[in-house]
Amino acid sequence: MMLRFKSWEGLNACHALAIHGHLTLLRTFLQKYRDPDHVEVATSITELLNLVLVGAGYPGVEDVGDRGELVRLLIHYGADGAFCFEGDGEDSTMLHFVRHPGEAAALLDDGADIDGMFMVSGCTPLMFATQPVANRSDGALVRFLYRCGADINLKNYDGEDAEAVARSCNNIEAADFLRDMKAPGGSYKKYLRAPRVELVRLRSLCDRGRAAPPSPSSAKLRTIPEAVVLQRMFGAPSKGRLPNEVFWHIISYWRTSRDD
């Protein structure tokens, strides 16, 4: 298939590759038709970058996951990751439209403003990330932007910070995370450790007879090995339960939904 770079007045094959996130074909096109050091093409390549980011939400577009590698490809060929759209009262940055951490990382590496405000609402990229949209890994994206230094205390024109925006969108996971980060003594390390702390508490409850692992015959267990693991982790010491030191070592490797 031969791709020809046409006018930007309408969608063409190159636009379609960007919208659908076809990394290999778009790389082939750029290698053949575009010089990364040619300044004149920078604006059109930046427009392609915009299509890569917003195209993931178009109806009928298949979710290809994180487009971070594609974003970096276009930046290599001259796209401006820190570009700010201006005009018609809708000023925004590329970072407002990312859906995955890899995309955000690529833009931030190119100088994108992590706290840039959307002119219409005053919302930052972090506030946008709390709003559930198609194909967005909102929980992971919110945590990533926070770790990169996004200000969780900034407010939009309605006086809402990112937590309030998340709650208004019924994004409880993001709202609770931001609440915990704002709380006195709150930290990301503490947030990551919380599920493991809960397992330690469960083990303590088992010691006091206030909880117990399911029996091997329980319908809740899918396999016999699963029952054995639970007995070794939470059963009585007389039944071969693992020592505390071994238990703590094991759960240090356990990955939860909070571990990105």
Image (cartoon, grey):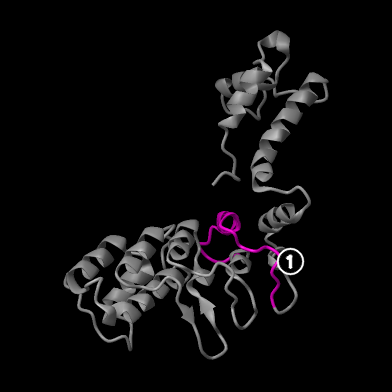
Q: Is residue 112 left or right of residue 194?
A: left
Can I make out residue 228 in this image?
yes
Q: Position of residue 57 (x, y in %)?
A: 48, 69
Q: Is residue 195 left or right of residue 10?
A: right
What residue is at 68 percent from the left and 19 percent from the top?
244
* The N terminus - image quarter: bottom left
Q: Is residue 143 left or right of residue 179?
A: left
Kind of residue sitting beneath label 1 = Ala
Label 1, secondary structure: give it.
helix
Quarter-wise, where is residue 195 in the image?
A: top right
Disc tally is: 1
Position of 193 relative to 49 (above/below): above
Q: Tell me where the magenta segment starts and ends, as one range.
A: 132-156
Dot 1: within a 10 Å radius of its alpha carbon, few (fewer than 14), some, or many (20 or more) residues? some
Position of 80 relative to 139 (above/below): below
Q: Is residue 19 left or right of residue 189?
A: left
What residue is at 38 percent from the left and 71 percent from the top?
19
Residue ID for mark 1: 164
Q: Position of residue 232 (x, y in %)?
A: 64, 17
Can I make out residue 217 in this image?
no
Quarter-wise, where is residue 88 in the image?
A: bottom right
Q: Position of residue 190 (x, y in %)?
A: 69, 42
What residue is at 48 percent from the left and 79 percent from the top?
84
- Magenta stretch, main secondary structure, is loop
**Which residue reaches farthest top?**
238
Q: Position of residue 101 (x, y in %)?
A: 50, 57
Quarter-wise, where is residue 110 in the image?
A: bottom left
Is residue 194 highlighted in magenta?
A: no
What residue is at 50 percent from the left and 86 percent from the top?
86
**Which residue reaches farthest bottom?**
88
